[in-house]
Structure formats: structure tokens, C-alpha cells
Amino acid sequence: MKDVSGGRRESIPNSLRRCLLRCTTLVLLFPLCFASPNTAPADELLASFPPPGTKGSKIAITVTAGESNRVGICPVTVVVRAIGPSFGAERKLTIELRPRLNPPSHNTFDFRQTITLQESDSVYEETFAVPAYYRWYHCRVRVLEAGVLLPGFDSSLSKSVFLTLGRLPELTIAIIEARTVDSDPPAWQRFPDCRSLSVGARGERPSSIYWQPPQLDHEQAKQSAETTSGSPVYIRRTHEDRLPPRWTDYNFADAILVSEKTLQRIHEESPPEFESLRQWLAAGGLLWCYGDAGTAGLDELFSLTNPWDRIPLQKIQESLQPQTARFPGATGLNTPPSGLDPGRRRVASGLDLEHPFLLLEGTRSIQQRIQTAPYLAGKIVYLDDPFPFPGSPNLWMAVIGESRQRIGTENRLGMNIANGDNNFWNWLIAEVGQPPVYKFLGMISLFVLLVGPVSYYLFLYLKRLYLFFVFAPIVALICTAVIGLYALIADGFGSRVRVRHLTLLNSAGDGITWSRQTYFSGLRPRDGVAWSRDSAVYPLRELQDSASLSPITSEPASAQIAIDDDVIRLTGSFMPSRTQSQFIVISPTQNAGSVIAHAGDGLVRVENQTAYPIQSILLADASNHYWLAESLDSGATVDATALLAIDAARWMTTNYLDYAPELPAGFQDASQSELLRLGNRRLRSQHNQSIFFSDNEGGLVEAMFRTAMVEQGTPPANRFIALADLPDRAIGIEDAKPVECIHMIMGEVQFEGHPNAPVDAGDREVQAESENQESEQ
């Protein structure tokens, strides 16, 4: 065989050629066998100002958006640079974003936030927490000063952005990358090798015919996490020194993976950043933590007082069952390789059977390595291993199986925010917008008689029959005006609100509030609704067909969201006139106080150290004895009455069902309405085109209350459940009138002493003196 240059080419034996071809094929297919998790693409540039050729501009602005595959928050970073040594004067600029979806969303809005440039500065940078209630197909950016658009500082809709809201519950993991000082860090500082985690997330086990992959070092593991593949797991790297300042900035993550020592260092060196992580965990997040020092350090960090739990063997076995993809976002069938039996190792010559990619770890071994503890609405999963990576796929399948209830923002909310939800109808204000049917029927009947035979015979008798054609429309206008005036007078011009406020508290006074609020205003409130900037706000709409909406446009939206100081404000069509609007508001609380039970001599005195006046409270001690107290103001102490278990169950079930979300009369048949009252999680609308299903019907916190108060019927040991007054700061409109509001609190109670323990003489004298003082007052 000759080449074009006339030289002689050596022939390659067929056997060697086939061997080389097989080796090349294996090398090319090897990355697909151990596909790495997806990671977020680079930030998307939304706008860059001023455009080329613009003269006279003294500043340059770039606006970039981070990825958001979850309903909630999209981080948008704004960087302003002075063209010159400094800005030269104090300036206030308003950054306006117009995110749009095609087809449009019912929650389409414009976002505005004002920034202040100091005279002596040359660079200003801030990350906005822009709500993401739908997929952003386009986003227009405008910059205004004193309400006037700066020349040239207006982008167009020609540029698409990548923001997507994946189908639930695609797993996104934020790995907190530890600070390192050398290229070969200790185990707790090494970046995790997530290949087994990716395999476990797909619900499959690697075949034993795979070659043993090389162990990845610190840098290789980081590069592996950056490789894009078809895995349903997305990896987001967050450096220890650049953690988000607010808890809502963690919205993109379903779980945070971090070593215990790194977490301890964050707590010591960056308390504000640790607090934002703690608040995210309290709101329903997942913390996957690993280490070899035990759980005592985590108990101290998060003020945990109860013993840790082990995952039941049955639940681990269910997580290891061969099945299709665990997440709807995954594609293709993920069945285990042929001939690979659960719980057994396949023998193959030349392979290391102890390698984690081949080891099918048993359920008891997994159970001994994992401990879990609830933290308010969230959960901590602790792996007793200094560096459990890559680990066996079975281990990560068990971890993910234990975490399913909290994967996905909408799954935690229990509502379909992007497309609307029929659960909108089970928390309405019943006394507004209801037409007086019988009065209207009487008025219409009177109108028919008046403009019919009465007016006809009257004008015929007066010989003015031609007036009949004038009298009828005048009376019709009068009747129409009376009906409209009646509606205005009956519903009023002010605002009303119905709030379902659920609060979780621990013994340290940390807590989270989950609030579902429905508003009705006779006239649209000028300032809209507003809550603290630390709150996560989700507008809930009824399920509608987006085809009925107007096409995508760059014109101003009818709804606006603005950040004013420390307040997030929703105006415009978020609060229309004479229409019920509904919101879900999640807010963390600090230093909220606790409930203390002083026990002795067969008595229990309950002290309310919280900021909430309590109407009625039920407590359970470690021996599952129950106590009930009523009318407990903030800072007050009252005697509790012992209850039997059946009476405690009746108190809890009655108080939950009396205030439970319920569909209005006529919306569905009575049997479905009763199922909803009992908390049937499988009750979904047959007309929901988005096929949305949540493990938490009504929301994660709602499910926790329903489980404790209805399904279990008694509070857990050392817990309390209380009915309390609604705090004024929970309402988004200052002068709104509360209607049928409910505030329930569930938390940890501190028992001091024992109900059957005798009280010594000194304590009895103090107790008698305090009782005398209270009686004198």
C-alpha cells in the first residue's frame, strides 16, 4: 500500500487492528458509563450598557443572570463601573427587568430595584433576588434615573435567556467547596466525587463488566462535576468564602452537601452566611453532611435536643428496588443491568470487588452509616464517614430516597405556582363576591312586572302608551345601578384578608412561618401588598389556559414587583379590584422565644415566653402525658389541666378540621370536599393539564401539621401545639380586615421537673408568692 508521497506504509495485522478499535471504543464509551452530574452553565449576559458608539455616558453597566431551574428566585448580578476615576456624584439608578414567557404566564411581571452610587466609588456590584414564577424566554433590561430612561440603556427582546423551570423533582445539589491551602488537601477539604451519586439518582446500578475507574483527586473531581451529561442530578459549586447573604438565594438547591468541619468553620468565621444557610434549612431544605466526629457538633450548631434517627430497613429496601427514573426530569429507562441481583456482588475476574462502583452495599450497612434529624421544616442527613465518595450507588439511593419529600420547590410548597393550581379555591374569603341570589331574583321579578303589564296598562290608561318605550330602559338602568351600588356597599371599598398562619418553633427560639393569605379589595390598593425582604413570596393563581392570554410583548406588564429598602412589594394585577388574590409567604423567625412547662407535685404550670398571645395550648411530655392550658398571654404563666389521650386526640382533630382548607359549596360534590377536609393527599383535579403532583398536599408545613393533628392525633413527645393570635406583621396590607384567620404553632417544649416530683419548701414559697401577686394584680 502506497501513500500520496510515494512512501511505503506498513500494514497493520487485522487482530491488532481489532484490538485497537475495541480499546478506542471503550475509551470513548467510558465517560458515558459513569456519566457525571449536570452543572449549571455560565451566567447569561442579559445586557451591557452603553452600546458601542454611544457618547456622553459616564457609567458602564452589565447585567447577568444565574441559572434558575426552580420556582422562586433567579440571581441577577448588576455591575456598574465609572468611566473615569469615580462616579463623581451620588446617583440613584433604577434597574428594570421585564422577564417574559412564550406563551405568556398569568404571573407576568416587571421587576424594579433602585441602587445608589456613592460619589467617591468607581465600582458598584449587587446581586438582585428576582422572583422566578415562570420560565424566562426573554428578558428586557432598562436603566432609569429619576424616572427617566437613560439614553441607550434599553435592551431589546431579541436575546433569549436560558432560565428554565424543570419538571419536578429534578435534583439539584449545592456543594460547598471548602477553602484549601495546597493541591493535596485533607479528606474533609477535598471536592466530592459525585459519580456514584449520579448513578444512584438514576435508580440504576453499574454493570460489573465496567472497568474499574480511576480514583479522582481534588482537581479531577471538580472537573468531573463540570461535565455535562444526561444525568437528572445538577451540581452547583458554591465556595465557602462566597456563600449567599440571604436564605432565599439558596432557592436553586434541593440539598446542600458539605463536610462537618467546613460547616463548623463557616459558623465560626462567617456567622451571617451560616445564618442564611440555617434559615434555608429551617424552611424545608436538605443538609447532607459527612464526617467522623459524630453528631454532637451538629447538635450544638442547630440546637438539636432529640436523639437522631436511623432510616428503617424497609424504607432503605424500597429505595433500592429496581425501577425507572426516580425523577420525571430524567430520560430513558434506568433498569439494573441484566443478571445483577440486589444485595449481591457479581464475580468477575480481574476486578476489585470492593470498589464502590461495583459494591452493592447491604441495607444494614447503609442503616449504620446514615443518621437523620428533623430541623423545623427541614432535615439533616448525616453520613458517618470522613469522605464517603464516590461511595456505593446503594448508599446514595438510600440518601435520596430519604430526601424525596423535600426535593423541588413546588413539591415543598404543595402547589403548582408556574401553571396555577386548583387548590386556590379551598382558601377563599366566603363573605365577599357572593351575589344575594334571592334578593336579585326578587328585584328581577319586580322589574319584569313593573316594565311589563304594570307600565303597559298604566300608560294605556293615561293614553300615553308611547312613554312605555322610554320608561322601560330608564327602569333597567336604575335596576342595574342599584345592583352595582349594592355590590359596592356590601363588599366595601377597603381590603379584607384571610390568613392560614403556621409556625414551627424549636427550643432555641428559632422558627419558620408558612402563611397562606387571600386578599380582597373593593378598590385596588395603591401600594399593593408588601412583606419583609427576608420572606419568600409566591403568588398562587387558579388553573387557567395560557392560550387565552395576550401574546408575548415588551410593553410594561400589568403586575410589578419592587424592592423598597427591606420590603418586597407586589402591585398592579397581583392585587386587582374586586377579585380574590392569594399568596404563599414563607418567613424565618429569630429569637421568637419558647414554651416552658414547670412541673412538680402533680401540677404543670405553662410559661409562654414567645411573642404570640396563645389562646389554647396542648403539651406532651416525654412519657406521653398530655396537658391543656388556655388564655396564655406573652410572658404569662398559667396552670395546665391533665388530659387523657383520647381527649387530646379529640382536641387536635377538632381544631384542625374546623379551620382546614375547604372547597366552597358547589365547587365539587360533598364526598370529594370531605376527603379534602381529611387531608387526602391524592385528591387532585382531573383537569390539571400540567400533571402536577406533590408529596405534600397543601405544602410541607401543612403536611406536618396534618400528620400530627389528624393522622397521629397526638403531639410527639416534648412537643406542643397551640392556637395563637395572628401577628399584625404577617399581613401584607396594613389596614386589611382579618376574616376567619387561624394561627397554629407547633414546637418543642422544655419541661423543668416532673409532674409527679415533689416541690421543695423554697420553690413552694416562691410559687405561692407569685400566685398572690397575680391575684392582687
Image (cartoon, rainbow, N blue to C red):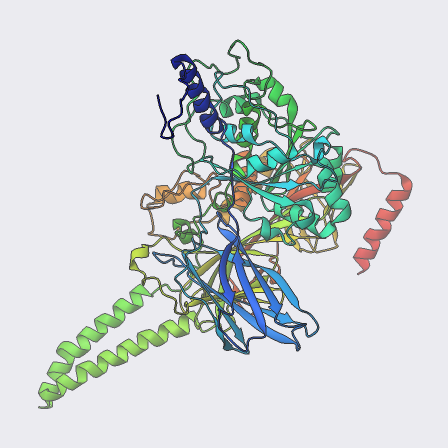
407 is higher (above) or lower (below) than 312: below
Q: Which is more toward the observer, 601 or 626?
A: 626
Q: How far from the left and from the top, in percent, is residue 298? A: 72, 37
Give the quarter of the image for residue 368: top right
753 is higher (above) or lower (below) than 314: below
Q: Which is more toward the observer, 685 or 717?
A: 685
* Rendered-image quadrant of the C terminus: bottom right
* Rendered-image quadrant of the N terminus: top left
Tell which residue pokes out farthest to the bottom in this image: 463
Q: How far from the left and from the top, in percent, is residue 738? A: 53, 63
Residue at image position (62%, 47%) is 280
Q: Which is more toward the observer, 338 or 418?
A: 338
Tell which residue pokes out farthest to the front in this image: 6
37 is higher (above) or lower (below) than 66: above
Q: How far from the left and from the top, in percent, is residue 245? A: 65, 54
Give the quarter of the image for residue 627: top right
Give the quarter of the image for residue 105: bottom left
Q: Is residue 273 visible?
A: yes
Left or right: residue 84 compared with residue 697 = right
Count every numbered label the image shows and give the total. 0
96 is higher (above) or lower (below) than 393: below
Tell which residue pokes out farthest to the right in this image: 762
Q: How far from the left and from the top, in percent, is residue 233? A: 50, 36
Q: Is residue 644 visible?
A: no
